[in-house]
């Protein structure tokens, strides 16, 4: 079973102080730590687990600058077999990324494509779904479980309100992977050393025969912090009175 | 000149950080309180290659450099000094075996260390021979095909846990030169006459084993001599060029961790209606801490670089050891200060870091001994 996993190098922003660039088009990234997108890490691990069951090859694929090699090495250390990097600044356009990935993916056979549900930085959640559309194959998003049997994948999808959807999907297909689908594993030093001997192929857009430099669907006009909302309501009084007021508020909210 | 970490080093740092945050941090407080640690922690760390990664491949290690070993321990110390010390000790002294051991010694004793099956130690210090290692009086007398060891040593890491120890012994009491009288012997701790008492009441680092040990007619075959008889002192000095840099890495990690805790705290803590991070006095403190940590790290890895290119630099090793441990003690003091009264309570990890830090200025040669080495090297006097 040959599995392609599309990954992205992202700045870690969860615990960092965020500032916006002067041109208001992006956040300042000079002082941020970059790493493999969390969702993609789960996708790589899932691919490696599937490979352990069904054999075959796990290929990781990324679009990004030279620094993206670090996340590819990480994926190889996690158990992927080889890596491909398209040398290009990461576009801010989901469809453009998907078109670029598709150009490479179409050159070889595959059974399954995994992506993360979304990227930690822009959170668009488009690439996996757009990729399936371009390749003309089925997809399922926000996948929390995969069971492969007889050329088909039985997958569980996460829905709103704690609901789950079970569906059977014909392979080849694209699945966008939700965090928590598997148990992450520590990377060993031996695996890091082995990763250095695995192949990482680097290609330019010209080499894959794809040349649009302009975004296809979207450009970013402005990045800003959300407007500050209403001030919090401070309840006053004795503890008994406050509990009473709080209970009333909760009852009201529940009713609405 | 290039200050960029290699891709491999970045990956190793990230792997070590994830392990430290996932496995050391959650149990650090409890292990410190109980004075114990879960035995499977060492096994897990070893399986991932974190124990003695500099041990050559043919002896079960990964054949990496001192730099990579330092990166791992810096990350462990950044997260949880008490358990970092537990994971730093098992391979302590293995450099001596790599440098001077016979093929048989290396084949027999190094693979179980790298695997995490055994732990070892290197015993030098005695009640009357601390900084003055040339005065070590534990004797090893050759009788036929054996050495017979008598004496006692104090404050020995892994004294009660180790499967074997390297023991710095007096083998030629008649030799007048203090640097030619000693030899290093490998002693399996299950030999009759060996006894170890674990030390209670350490100021910090409670999870790790430190012991007073006793040799009462302990007999080892002459094949247990490591290196050359009478050459122990210069072998020890060669070892210290390496081990001191590793202590500098411990110190850099502790200082980094303490500083990060302080930064997190001052960004949240509000007084006079604003975060204390917004006060210039806090910004000055953090600026000083950050600069000090950077200097400690730079000196540490410069000293590593000398060792890894095969030309250990005693002056740089001592500079790194003195300065980084000095930085650790200063930075952790300031970091606790920024926590105010809360820093004095064990609700925050900073008090553990504070207690751990002081040892860095004491073991592997006190800061005064480091300055002695540096001064002599700089001035060219003895």
Image (tube, grey):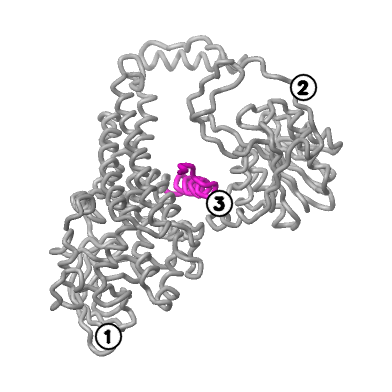
Residue at image point 20% right, 82% down:
B141
In three-dimensional space, the C-alpha distance between marks 1 and 3, rounded to whole angstroms, equals: 45 Å
The magenta region covers B1-24
| Mark 3 crowdedness (10 Å alpha carbons): few <14, some 14-19, many ≥20 | many
Dominant secondary structure of the residues highlighted in magenta in the image = helix
In this orientation, which residue lies closer to the viewer: A186 or B224? B224
Q: Secondary structure at mark 1?
A: strand
Quadrant of the image containing the N terminus of chain B? top left
Q: Is residue A221 above or below residue B32?
A: above
- Residue wearing tag 1: B146
- The span from disc 1 to disc 2 (Cα, nearest Å) is 82 Å
Residue annotated with mark 3? A187
Disc 3: host chain: A
Give the residue number, with chain letter if any, for mark 2. Answer: A217
- Residue at image x 18%, y 70%? B152
User: Which quarter shows the C terminus of chain B?
Assistant: bottom left
| In the image, residue B301 above or below residue B349 | below
> x%, y% of residue A254?
59, 18
- For the residues labelled 3 and 2, the Cα–Cα distance comes to 38 Å
Name the element at disc 3: loop
Asked if the stretch drawn in magenta spans residue B14, the answer is yes
Based on the displayed image, in which of its 4 quarters is residue B110 positioned? Answer: bottom left
Q: Is residue A212 left or right of residue B291?
A: right
Q: Mark 2 belongs to which subunit?
A: A
């Amino acid at each position: 079973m040959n599995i392609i996993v599309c990954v992205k190098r992202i700045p870690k922003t969860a615990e960092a102080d965020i500032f916006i660039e002067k041109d208001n088009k992006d956040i300042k990234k000079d002082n941020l730590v970059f790493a493999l997108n969390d969702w993609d890490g789960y996708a790589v691990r899932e691919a490696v687990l599937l490979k352990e069951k069904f054999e075959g090859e796990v290929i990781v694929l990324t679009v990004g600058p030279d620094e993206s090699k670090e996340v590819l090495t990480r994926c190889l250390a996690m158990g992927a077999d080889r890596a491909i990097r398209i040398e290009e600044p990461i576009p801010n356009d989901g469809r453009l990324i998907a078109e670029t990935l598709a150009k490479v993916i179409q050159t070889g056979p595959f059974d399954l494509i995994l992506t993360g549900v979304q990227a930690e930085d822009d959170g668009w959640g488009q690439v996996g779904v757009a990729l399936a559309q371009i390749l003309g194959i089925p997809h399922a998003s926000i996948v929390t479980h995969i069971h492969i049997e007889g050329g088909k994948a039985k997958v569980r999808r996460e829905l709103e309100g704690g609901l789950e959807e079970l569906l059977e999907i014909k392979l080849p297909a694209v699945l966008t992977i939700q965090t928590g689908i598997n148990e992450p594993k520590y990377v060993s030093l031996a695996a890091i050393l082995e990763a250095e001997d695995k192949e990482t192929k680097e290609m330019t857009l010209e080499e894959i025969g794809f040349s649009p430099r302009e975004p296809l669907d979207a450009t970013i006009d402005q990045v800003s912090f959300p407007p500050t909302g209403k001030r919090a309501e401070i309840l006053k009084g004795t503890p008994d009175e406050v509990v009473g007021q709080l209970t009333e508020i909760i009852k009201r909210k529940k009713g609405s | 000149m290039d200050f960029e970490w290699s891709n491999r080093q970045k990956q190793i740092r990230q792997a070590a950080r994830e392990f430290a945050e996932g496995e050391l941090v959650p149990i650090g407080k409890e292990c410190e309180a109980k004075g114990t640690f879960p035995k499977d922690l060492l096994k897990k760390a070893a399986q991932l290659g974190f124990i003695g990664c500099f041990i050559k491949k043919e002896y079960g290690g990964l054949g990496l450099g001192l730099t990579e070993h330092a990166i791992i321990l810096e990350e462990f110390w950044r997260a949880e000094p008490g358990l970092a010390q537990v994971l730093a000790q098992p391979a302590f002294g293995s450099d001596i075996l790599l440098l001077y051991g016979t093929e048989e010694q290396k084949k027999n004793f190094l693979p179980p260390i790298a695997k995490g099956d055994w732990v070892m130690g290197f015993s030098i210090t005695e009640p009357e021979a601390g900084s003055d290692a040339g005065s070590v009086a534990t004797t090893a007398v050759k009788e036929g095909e054996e050495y017979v060891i008598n004496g006692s040593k104090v404050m020995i890491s892994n004294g009660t846990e180790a499967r074997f120890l390297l023991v710095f012994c007096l083998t030629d009491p008649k030799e007048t030169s203090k640097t030619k009288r000693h030899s290093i012997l490998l002693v399996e701790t299950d030999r009759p006459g060996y006894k170890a008492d674990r030390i209670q009441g350490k100021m910090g680092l409670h999870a790790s084993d430190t012991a007073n040990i006793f040799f009462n007619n302990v007999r080892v075959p002459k094949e247990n001599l490591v290196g050359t008889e009478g050459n122990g002192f210069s072998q020890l000095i060669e070892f210290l060029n390496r081990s001191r840099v590793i202590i500098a890495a411990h110190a850099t990690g502790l200082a980094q961790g303490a500083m990060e805790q302080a930064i997190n705290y001052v960004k949240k803590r509000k007084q006079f209606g604003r975060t204390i991070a917004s006060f210039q006095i806090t910004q000055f403190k953090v600026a000083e801490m950050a600069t000090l940590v950077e200097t400690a790290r730079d000196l540490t890895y410069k000293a590593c670089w000398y060792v890894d290119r095969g030309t250990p630099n005693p002056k740089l090793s001592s500079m790194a050891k003195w300065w980084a441990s000095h930085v650790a003690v200063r930075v952790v003091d300031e970091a606790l200060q920024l926590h105010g009264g809360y820093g004095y309570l064990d609700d925050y990890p900073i008090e553990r870091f504070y207690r751990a830090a002081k040892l860095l200025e004491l073991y592997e040669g006190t800061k005064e001994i480091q300055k002695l080495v540096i001064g002599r090297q700089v001035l060219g006097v003895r």
